[in-house]
Image: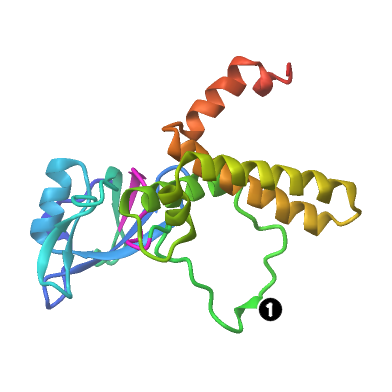
Amino acid sequence: MKMNVEKIRFDESGLIPVIVQDAKTREVLTLAYMNAESLRRTLDSGETWFWSRSRSELWHKGETSGHTQRVVSIQVDCDRDALAVLVEPAGPACHTGERTCFHHGIEGADSIDTAGEHRPLGETLEQLYAVVQARRREMPEGSYTTYLFEKGLDKILKKVGEESAETIIAAKNDDAGELAAEMSDLLYHLVVLLVERGLTLADIGRELERRGASRGEA
């Protein structure tokens, strides 16, 4: 059911909370606020606009970082005082470079049984790629990824070689945890290499599909 924008209930400050989710995975990316003007701009532009309570100004998500969010749909809750916005994100939602702003756990919550609830590897690699890409663009001081990009291609290739050798050694040992750790290190450095050479995970996916891997013909 479609609802007229005029029926949306803003609070006494003229704001409404907005839950932003990835349209594909339904992962919650951030919680922000809109006023009537930012909602209008969101509807007109097809990209998210919010109201910054700390700066008291409108802001267009991705205006400076390039991490825009294309709006797929906007839903109003039953009380008409909260919005859920499904988006296609062009990069991480969080200013820290994380895919979602909700990336910190709470002490004491480790006892909650979440066995088997793990993000698919493809989504994890996409998040890692986005973070590495952000490091390449922003080059934050003190970051190991920044260090690799500063040292250049030869250093990155050297690390890929080292991690490949360590993965081989770990595979010869009877320790699944060690092998998983070494393969994770190798995957990380391969993602750094992809970003350095301007390739994307989609490029790799297309090549695998060309080889028939997705049809079991590899």
Percent position of residue 66, x then y: 25, 46
| Residue 153: percent from left, percent from top | 48, 39
Classify residue 162 as left or right of residue 80: right
Q: Residue at point 65% right, 77% down?
A: 110
Where 19 falls versus 169 (above or below)?
below
Q: Which residues are magenta?
A: 84-96
Residue at x-position 33% and y-position 46%:
87
Residue 172 visible here: yes
Residue type of the residue flagged with mark 1 = Ser
The residue drawn where x is 86% and y is 57% is: 175
Is residue 86 one of those drawn in magenta?
Answer: yes
* Most foreground residue, 126 or 138: 138
Instruction: Indicate whether residue 192 is drawn in magenta.
Output: no
Residue 59 coordinates in the image, percent (x, y): 15, 58
Residue 183 horizontal/vertical position (percent): 70, 48
Q: Residue at x 48, y 51 (%)?
A: 148
Residue bearing the label numbered 1: 111
Q: Which quadrant would the C terminus be assigned to in this image? A: top right
Q: Residue furthest bottom?
A: 108
